[in-house]
Image (cartoon, rainbow, N blue to C red):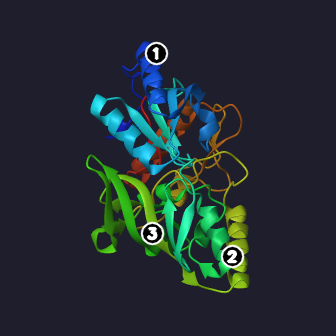
Amino acid sequence: MCIGWERICFGKPGWYRWPEMRALAEDLRRMGLATREGVSLRRYTTVRTGGKAALMVFPQTLGELEKLWLYLRRRGVPYFLLAGGSKVLFPDEGFSGVVINLRLLSGFRELSPGRLEVLCGTPVAMLIAYGLKRGFRGFEFLAGIPATLGGAIRMNAGAFGQTTGTFIEEVWFLDSGGLRKVDRTGLSFRYRRLVPEGLVAKAVVRLLPASPPEVRERVKTLIRERRCKQPLGQPSFGSTFLNPDTGPPAGWLIEKAGLKGKRRGGARISPRHANFIVNEGGARSRDILDLMEEARERVFHRFGILLQTEVRVVRA
């Protein structure tokens, strides 16, 4: 049962099937793009579930990304943007469109000390490492999380009282007109979202001066705290649901609804933190989705609060 939220239900497989996809793959290769067909999606998501992608494309430059994105949009080809894969649930049936894998769009250049132009697929860990080496702080609050900068900006990722938006000066979006720069005054960072919406291609980040020992100690402290409270050693999304605007956090609500430790197939609501759903081995996406739906139902019936997910649930 889906309570008032159809997006959480998996749909039927899409229209784009093998003969069309085969021709599309050949067309993209002629354009110089790296492609793979029939790729297992579980290898590319942190929860380790999902079927196969009909086609996965690996742009290596912003020029290739722009060319690919405009090509797919003009032809009405279904696509999904994938970077770190930490907040996405693909169906067991797979994805019948094109997955644009952003992992090769990684790296940054130093504009000035602490001020960096960063590609969307860059792991946040690289920015933390830069700060440790050069004496700057900023993204330590995301230490231990497999986030990329593009994804962190898109959802304004945050923890321990800090958010990504604090350190962003400008963002380059990709839209129907190509690459478009939006400076700080045009950006509105909200709880787990950014306005305007769009494909984040790159951004300018400004870090703050700090001593390397100070940064190193903060990273150690935050990772230690995460390990104490969260199931870091098991495949998961990270947190599953957004905390309500007021009142107790989502994990507390799920625990008080009696679901902490609840299993469905190979998936489980973590006994360590109830806002984490872990894959204990062999879980299907359907198992995880069932637990998400049950958590929303039980919390709604007990507290009258309808939890909203942080996870993008993809249709087949």
Q: Which mark is residue 132?
A: 2
Residue 243, placed above or below residue 41:
below
| Frontmost residue, 141 versus 206 | 206
For disc 3, the marked residue is 204
Quadrant for the N terminus in the image: top left
Q: Are marks 1 and 2 in contact (CB under 8 Å)?
A: no
Q: Which amino acid lies under the numbered mark 2 shown in the image of this protein?
A: Leu
Q: Are marks 1 and 3 in contact (CB under 8 Å)?
A: no
For disc 1, the marked residue is 18
Give me the C-alpha separation between circle 1 and circle 3: 40 Å
Residue 165, given in percent of the width and then of the height, sits at: 43, 70
Residue 62, given in percent of the width and then of the height, sits at: 45, 50
Q: Residues within 10 Å of mark 3 (few under 14, many from 20)?
A: many
Residue 221, given in percent of the width and then of the height, sits at: 71, 74
Give me the C-alpha separation between circle 2 and circle 3: 19 Å
Residue 68, placed above or below residue 135:
above
